[in-house]
Image (cartoon, rainbow, N blue to C red):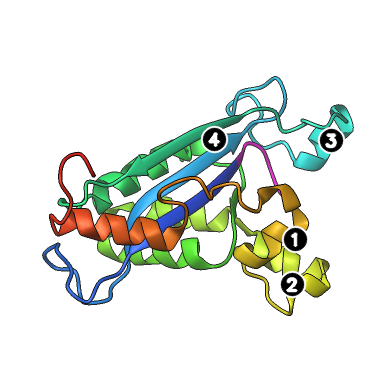
Amino acid sequence: GVRLPVYYLDFESVSSIKPTLEGVAPWATLVTQYSLHVAAGAGHTPMQRRGDSVGQLEENWGGEDMLGPLTHLDYLANARVDCRGEMLRKLLDDLHLEGEHDMGSVIVYSSYEQTQLKTLAKLFPEEGERIEKVIARLVDLEKVVKECIAHPLFRGRSSLKVTLPVLVPSYEGRYDDLEINNGAAASFAFQAMAQGDLGPEEE
């Protein structure tokens, strides 16, 4: 089951036929950013709630906001420097991989984050043990949607772009006013910065 504190993890990446970083193959996926939201349970910090199940919290709390407020942690790479090692170490630190602290579930949607973590483990074998601990804590919500939820507007698909607006109608259009409002636009902007195509004001 899902255990507290709950970490919601999302990666962003770029892939280019002509990478600007040395040692990166054409079309190789390069993780450039992570976003991590942490829910510890109402009235508690992540360390106070470690190891409790969400079911236990629901029994004890019973309120609408039983997971409590979200703490946001993130990392955005410098487009002109290979920041993968630094980013990985910060992520592992943010996930509190120290002894009994590494109990909280890490929520993802699809196998993408796991695939990228395995790639990073090959690049940085010295962090392999800690990465394996993260992988062991992953909970893939796409599998839950596929197995437990059916809706005609899904049209047989399960990607987050399809399911989220159906399940949470208020989500649709939330980011329309942002200049960069989707992963493809973010990837394009990052690659433009890496190639020096943007001026200081645009960056």
Residue 98 at least partly seen: no
- The residue beneath circle 2 is 154
Q: Quadrant of residue 157?
A: bottom right
Are the residues tagged 2 and 4 within 8 Å (C-beta)? no
Mark 4 or mark 1, which is nearer the start of the sequence? 4
Are the residues tagged 3 and 4 within 8 Å (C-beta)? no
- The residue beneath circle 3 is 58
- The residue beneath circle 4 is 101
Task: Give the spatial CA distance, label 2 vs label 4.
Answer: 38 Å
Point out residue 28 in the picture as x, y percentages from the top left corner.
Answer: 28, 73
Are the residues tagged 2 and 1 within 8 Å (C-beta)? yes
Mark 4 or mark 2, which is nearer the start of the sequence? 4
Dot 3: within a 10 Å radius of its alpha carbon, few (fewer than 14), some, or many (20 or more) residues?
some
> Is label 3 or label 1 in front?
1
Task: Give the spatial CA distance, label 1 vs label 4.
Answer: 36 Å
Residue type at numbered disc 2: Phe
Are the residues tagged 2 and 3 within 8 Å (C-beta)? no
Q: Residue at x 74, y 65 (%)?
A: 145
Q: Is 203 drawn above or below residue 131 in the view shown?
A: above
Residue type at numbered disc 1: Val
Dot 4: within a 10 Å radius of its alpha carbon, few (fewer than 14), some, or many (20 or more) residues?
some
In depth, the one of 27 and 189 nearer the eye is 189
Mark 1 or mark 3, which is nearer the start of the sequence? 3
Point out residue 52 in the picture as x, y percentages from the top left corner.
Answer: 72, 36
The secondary structure that most of the magenta stretch takes on is loop
Task: Give the spatial CA distance, label 3 vs label 1.
Answer: 25 Å
Task: Give the spatial CA distance, label 3 vs label 4.
Answer: 21 Å
